[in-house]
């Protein structure tokens, strides 16, 4: 097995007596696409912020490429981990192209000469996310969903081995959600690793090859989506009753207690 890009050992985070992350052990291997599921307030964003090193762990340790995360310079972490936050408001009215170009900032010292073709690479990242026509628009004037696609293009350009995403389909329309999931799948297929927070178990089934379920700061399940995502887990995490429907390649869940408006 290849060495883990990122791993955590007995990771804990607490504020006063409130334990937000409770003795978590995990590993992210190259090419894995991991979906992180959990109810509101379970600790998903806190876990991502710990793995990024922007929150200091109360106890336990995180290792990036085998070295303690706390021993890496921030710039070197940014060369290895890209982060797509839920919301982001810059202080300046950057254009979309300028926002995406910022994805190269951590690399520029080392690869200045390679960045001669930056314009082209930004165009490619914008095309990949289907937003080439927005390139000269002012980022702060875009819709929430459009901004999300810009942040994803920026993370793509960062060309890190690991991308952490906090609810990336939030605010995207139905078509853009599916295109984004496909894109995430192909990024993982190309050898990069992805950790995505999602509230949608079906998205985890479509785009992830591994699932972590977080409850009250504890990792209660870790395995393949087909094994882990069942009505039992959905009930445990979200306190709702669903039935499972399996078709050739897909699994769906339908609510058991909720009758659609369109029912005659
Ligand atoms: N700075 C803070 N001070 C006190 N409590 C906090 C702080 N940050 C987070 N929390 C609490 O920690 C818990 C976990 O928060 P977190 O944002 O990680 O949850 P989440 O799983 O990402 O939730 P959501 O799905 O709603 O985004 C919540 O109960 C939250 O209220």
Image (cartoon, rainbow, N blue to C red):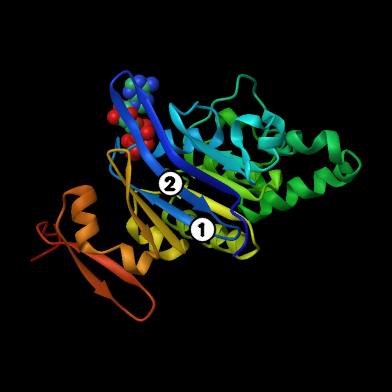
Q: Residue 58 at what x, y percent from top left?
A: 43, 26
Q: Looking at the image, which residue is at 70% across and 48% down?
A: 159
Q: Find ligand 1 in the image and state its quadrant.
A: top left
Which of pointers 2 and 1 lies earlier in the amino acid sequence? 2
Q: Of the residues tagged 2 and 1, which is closer to the observer?
A: 2
Q: Looking at the image, which residue is at 34% across and 53% down?
A: 200
Q: Residue 223 at what x, y percent from top left?
A: 39, 62
Q: Quadrant of the C terminus?
A: bottom left
- In this image, 148 relative to 226: left or right? right
Q: Quadrant of the N terminus?
A: bottom right
Q: Residue 145 at what x, y percent from top left?
A: 48, 42
- In this image, 42 relative to 263: left or right? right
- In this image, 125 relative to 181: left or right? right
Looking at the image, residue 231 lies above or below residue 194: below
Q: What residue sits right under mark 2 in the picture?
A: 25
Q: Which residue lies most toward the bottom here?
A: 248
Numbered disc 1: secondary structure: strand
């Amino acid at each position: 097995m290849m060495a883990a890009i990122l791993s955590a050992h007995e990771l804990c985070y607490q504020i006063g007596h409130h334990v937000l992350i409770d003795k978590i052990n995990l590993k992210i291997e190259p090419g894995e696409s991991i979906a992180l599921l959990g109810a509101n307030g379970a600790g998903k964003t806190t876990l991502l912020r710990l793995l990024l090193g922007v929150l200091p762990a109360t106890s336990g340790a995180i290792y990036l490429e085998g070295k303690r995360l706390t021993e890496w310079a921030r710039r070197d972490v940014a060369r290895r981990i890209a982060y797509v936050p839920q919301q982001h408001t810059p202080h300046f009215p950057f254009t979309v192209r300028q926002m995406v170009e910022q994805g190269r900032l951590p690399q520029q010292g080392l690869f200045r000469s390679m960045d001669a073709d930056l314009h082209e690479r930004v165009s490619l990242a914008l095309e990949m996310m289907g937003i080439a026509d927005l390139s000269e628009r002012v980022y702060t004037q875009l819709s929430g969903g459009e901004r999300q696609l810009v942040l994803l293009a920026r993370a793509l350009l960062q060309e890190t081995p690991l991308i952490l995403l906090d609810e990336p389909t939030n605010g995207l329309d139905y078509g853009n959600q599916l295109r984004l999931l496909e894109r995430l799948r192909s990024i993982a297929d190309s050898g990069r690793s992805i950790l995505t927070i999602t509230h949608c178990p079906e998205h985890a089934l479509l785009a992830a090859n591994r699932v972590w379920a977080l409850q009250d700061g504890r990792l209660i399940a870790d395995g393949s989506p087909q094994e882990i995502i069942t009505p039992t887990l959905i009930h445990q995490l979200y306190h709702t009753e669903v039935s499972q429907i399996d078709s050739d390649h897909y699994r769906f869940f339908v609510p058991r207690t909720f009758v659609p408006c369109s029912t005659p």
